[in-house]
Image: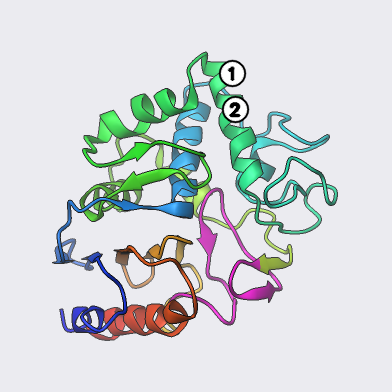
Amino acid sequence: MNAFELLDEWPVGRVAAGVILPDRSTQLYGDPNDVFELASITKPLTALATLIAVEEGIVGLDDRCGPPAATIRHLLAHAAGLAPDQRRLLTEPARRRIYSNSGYEIVADAVADASELAFQNYFTEALVEPLGLVNTKLTGSPAYGADSSVADLLVIVGELTTDNPRLLAQSTIDEMCAPAFPDLAGVLPGYGIQDPNTWGLGFEIRGLKRPHWTGSSNSRETFGHFGRAGTFLWIDPVAQVACIVLTDREFGDWAKQRWPAFSEAVLTSL
């Protein structure tokens, strides 16, 4: 894939990438089993584990959780009104999109309490082991503390895009990747105020956001996440393409032009 030539010039120490094409074939760059910190790409994985708990009847999306009147659904969609890194309420639920690490930690605590397992153990038993992931571990916060590899993330992406998912009902996957509380404005970290700032349950949705870390040709329906560790993952259901890039350099100005340019090159190479 010609787009991979752009990665040769990135100012990073290590980089690995994987692209799933419309015919379901996979293109790789670098070592797919090289392990990287995911940072906030951990959040979609935590959301997946939580939704497995929902389907198992351990918790419910509309269970009260965290702040008064907030639910697990609010917390997964960054719509509970919590501060970014404190369990402190800034506004009422469903009033503003406030990107919150603490919200994901509250959700993980709820799953741990209801399942009577440490969330790290539930994460492993519900998500890692059934999918046969070999490089994925939750070692810290359920908001940003996982490590993984391109190979493992390709398996997770495959689970989200197959016609026959193993872990979740298709209706649950559809709900995860659809706008939740869709009209809320808020700050997209690194990219400023977005109105609306559209999110699903664990995934950010591109929608009408400008500027953005995906390519200008990515559809509005594109969903994914990026992490401070210099990592990103997106799935474009219109183009039927998925893209994963993991690096060892913290997100910053170096990424703001290179990430969209790479995504654009992937889409225009089809």
**Location of residue 215 in the rendering, given as x and y in whole percent from the top left corner:** 42, 80
Residue for badge 1: 113
Residue for point 82% across, 45% down: 89
Left or right placement of residue 264 versus residue 141 in this view: left
Q: CA distance from mark 2 to mark 1?
A: 6 Å
**Location of residue 231 in the rendering, given as x and y in whole percent from the top left corner:** 38, 63
**Which amino acid, mark 1?**
Asp
The relative height of residue 51 versus residue 113 in the rendered view (above or below) is below
Q: Are marks 2 and 1 in contact (CB under 8 Å)?
A: yes
Q: Secondary structure at mark 1?
A: helix
The relative height of residue 246 versus residue 75 in the rendered view (above or below) is below
> Was residue 198 drawn as part of the magenta stretch in this picture?
yes
Residue for point 35% across, 29% down: 124
Q: Main secondary structure of the magenta part?
A: loop
Residue range corresponding to the magenta coloring: 188-214
**Which amino acid, mark 2?**
Asp
Quadrant of the image containing the C terminus: bottom left
Residue for point 51% across, 17% down: 115
Q: Callout 2 environment at 10 Å: few (<14), some (14 to 19), or many (20+)?
A: some
Residue for point 45% across, 43% down: 145
The relative height of residue 99 versus residue 62 in the rendered view (above or below) is below
**Location of residue 236 in the rendering, given as x and y in whole percent from the top left corner:** 38, 67
Residue for badge 2: 109
**Location of residue 139 in the rendering, given as x and y in whole percent from the top left corner:** 41, 36
